[in-house]
Image (cartoon, grey):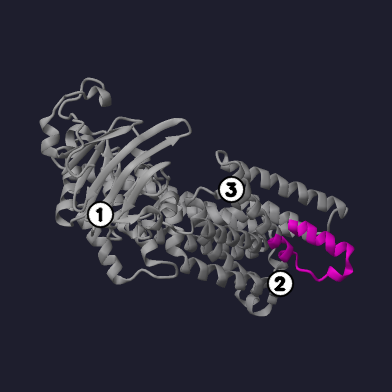
Amino acid sequence: MIQGIFQYEFLQNAFLTGILIGFLAPLLGVFIVVRRLSLIADALSHVTLAGIAASLLLEKYFAALSGLNPLYLGMVFSVGGSLFIEKLRGVYKHYQELAIPIILSGGIGLGVIFISLADGFNTDLYSYLFGSVSAVSRTDLWVIFIISIVVVMTIILLYKELFLLSFDEEHAKASGIAAKSIHFIFIIMVALVIAASMRIVGIMLVSSLMTLPVAASIRIAKGFKQTIFLSIIFGEVSVLGGLFASYYLDLAPGGTIVMIAVAILVFTIFYKKLIIKNHVSQGGAAG
Amino acid sequence: MKSQSIIEIKQVSYRYEKDTVLENINLIIPNGSFLAIVGPNGSGKSTLLKLILGLLKPQKGEIRLFGQEMNKFKDWQQIGYVSQKANSFNTGFPATVFEVVSSGLTKKLGLFRFFKKEDSQKVYDALESVGMGKFSHRNIGELSGGQQQRVFIARALVSEPKLLILDEPTVGVDAENVNAFYQMLADLNKKRGITLLLVTHDVGTISDKVTHVACLNKHLHFHGDTHEFEKHQSEGMSEFYGTDVKLISHHHDHGGVFK
């Protein structure tokens, strides 16, 4: 495969995109998980599906749009969906989690209508649902590269505000932080990264890349920065390991990536148990 | 006249719809004092704090902070606040004590400014002053309720406020540690010269630690310093606590700095 990377452009695209996604998704995922917004990734990925379906539909009927990368409209829908979620969270102040199923089912409903309007699609749609390594184009890579730079810069610049907002929203507001604007910027970044990630792992599996590495690292990390660091390591191991394994074993890459992330998670759970057990038995020996 | 008082409250009343919660409150908190406002649940303690913090506006009366009118006051960095909810945070949150305390500098540093070496020193100093210096690298969720509360006080202290406001700070603190906790606050008041205002319904334990006591139940009754406060034990406390309260009482002449 290493040879293949030098030979085939599509493999290069897939690998470089994978490295970027393996970094971005867990980085944002940490903030999502600690703020108990894990399901937002699911809702937005389904809205992204509607955007992609819309783009494929337009492509079918308007020849002028045939070169349009579905990623763009997917992003537009995802960002739009994130704004809707925020709006709904304001409307249902006491049932904020309601926003997520509303947007999620709305996204699927819209997507299914677009798909049926186009009398079903070619194989493209499958690759968006479950990810496809060969589908990643050079343009995709560049778009995702630009998103990565924007997201990383934003996180670095707003790190202390994002931390405070995640740890103690009330205190953040009371101390005069522009909590609303910062949350808004954050949710737009999430929407962009979800749209960007679906090329590799697919719409159905995007959220796992944002939550599983974080779920694993939160078990064993000391402190917030270490949680971010370990999440990114786990994310990269999952993506790169998944791409290699799927290439050699001829498996679906999206699914393989997710299953490696699950394996890491299971490992950390047992690792923690083992450590606690050791502590206890050592303590017992000493006493 | 240059005012030495940190907070001046003049004839303030507040009601939620028809319910009058606070009526005609007058209070002056001098610089360097340690004032405890005691009162039963629903006596308007939290409302009074919200008024002082500018989160609510009184329908009547005036509040001045550091000699300035409330609506002109901008220097909120001078006031540290530890809310009652501080100890109901997500205890699974993966942050070290150091990270939590340094988040207290967020506003002071400002947007797009990074944390520097001298800021770390401030964090360690704040932790030291609440007796939590050794815990800086522990995860916040591993600590006991009392230790967490100390960490939240350190977070409020790190931006070097002149006034620290605490809303029922001993709620999550084990009974046997409450005394040590108040001693720590008294030390902050004496050694760092921070003016402290706390509301509580812990009537018994605080009286030998604070410098001033006031009782609140819709009306505020100021007792001057604690000696005066203790002299008048068990007179008419039923208005506040029913019958079984030892130690404190109130008298209705609004003397001293209270006018």
x then y, percent, for residue B241: 26, 25
Pick the front one: A128 or B165 = B165
N-terminal label among 3 and 2: 3
Chain letter behind tag 2: A
Chain letter behind tag 3: A
Pick the front one: A54 or A11 = A54
Label 2 – label 1 distance at C-alpha:
50 Å
**In the figure, A264 relative to B23: above or below?**
below
Pick the front one: A246 or A117 = A117
Picture quarter with the C terminus of chain B: top left
Q: Quadrant of residue B12?
A: top left
**Label 3 secondary element:** helix
Q: Which mark is residue B135?
A: 1
Q: Is residue B257 magenta?
A: no
**Is residue B61 something that shows in the picture?**
yes
Q: Is the residue marked by circle 1 packed among few (<14), some (14-19), or many (20+) residues within 10 Å?
A: some
Q: Give the residue type that dot 3 points to.
A: Leu
Residue that mark 2 sits on: A137
Residue that mark 3 sits on: A39
Chain letter behind tag 1: B
The stretch in magenta equals A51-76
Q: Is the residue marked by circle 2 packed among few (<14), some (14-19), or many (20+) residues within 10 Å?
A: some
Callouts 1 and 3 in the same chain: no
